[in-house]
Image (spheres, rainbow, N blue to C red):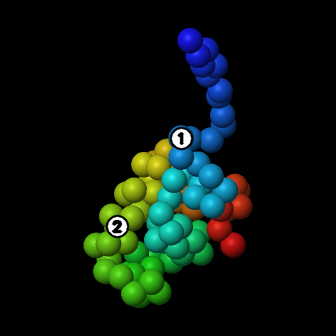
Amino acid sequence: MTLRIGITSDYPVGWTPQRPYNLSPREMAVLGEMAKGLSDTQIAEALGITKFTVNKHIGSILIKTDTRSRTGAAVRAIREHLVD
């Protein structure tokens, strides 16, 4: 019989230094552009993707970072040094 002890963490499941909040590399790129204050259109142009795709990534970022707005996600990214 194996005894499992629950370990609590301040980080969500899947968090690693390389993939904080289990964000994909593309989501990290979008988050970085959001933290710079770029609009969806500007992010799309900067990353060579459509505005629709940017919106989908932002939705995933908000869910994964447990934030309610793009501003909240950008602030969290800056405070937690997730972006340069």
Seen in the picture, residue 36 relative to 62 is either above or below; the reply is below
Q: Is residue 43 left or right of residue 12?
A: left
Q: Label 1 belongs to which residue?
A: 13
Disc 1 secondary structure class: loop
- The answer to whether one can see residue 3 in this image is yes
> What residue lies at 50% left-to-right and 69% top-to-bottom?
25
- Depth check: 47 or 51 in front? 47
Residue 84 horizontal/vertical position (percent): 69, 72
Q: Is residue 42 left or right of residue 81?
A: left
Q: Which mark is residue 55?
A: 2
Residue 82 horizontal/vertical position (percent): 65, 62
> What residue lies at 61% left-to-right and 14% top-to-bottom?
3
Q: Is residue 68 left or right of residue 21?
A: left
Camera-side mark, 1 or 2: 1
Outermost residue, front side: 1
> What residue lies at 46% left-to-right and 71% top-to-bottom?
26
Residue 49 horizontal/vertical position (percent): 35, 82
Outermost residue, left side: 52
How far apart in space, not on screen, are marks 1 and 2 (Cα)? Answer: 24 Å
Seen in the picture, residue 62 relative to 50 is either above or below; the reply is above
Task: Indicate the amino acid at tag 1.
Answer: Val
- Depth check: 78 or 14 in front? 14
Task: Indicate the amino acid at tag 2.
Answer: Asn
Residue 6 horizontal/vertical position (percent): 61, 22
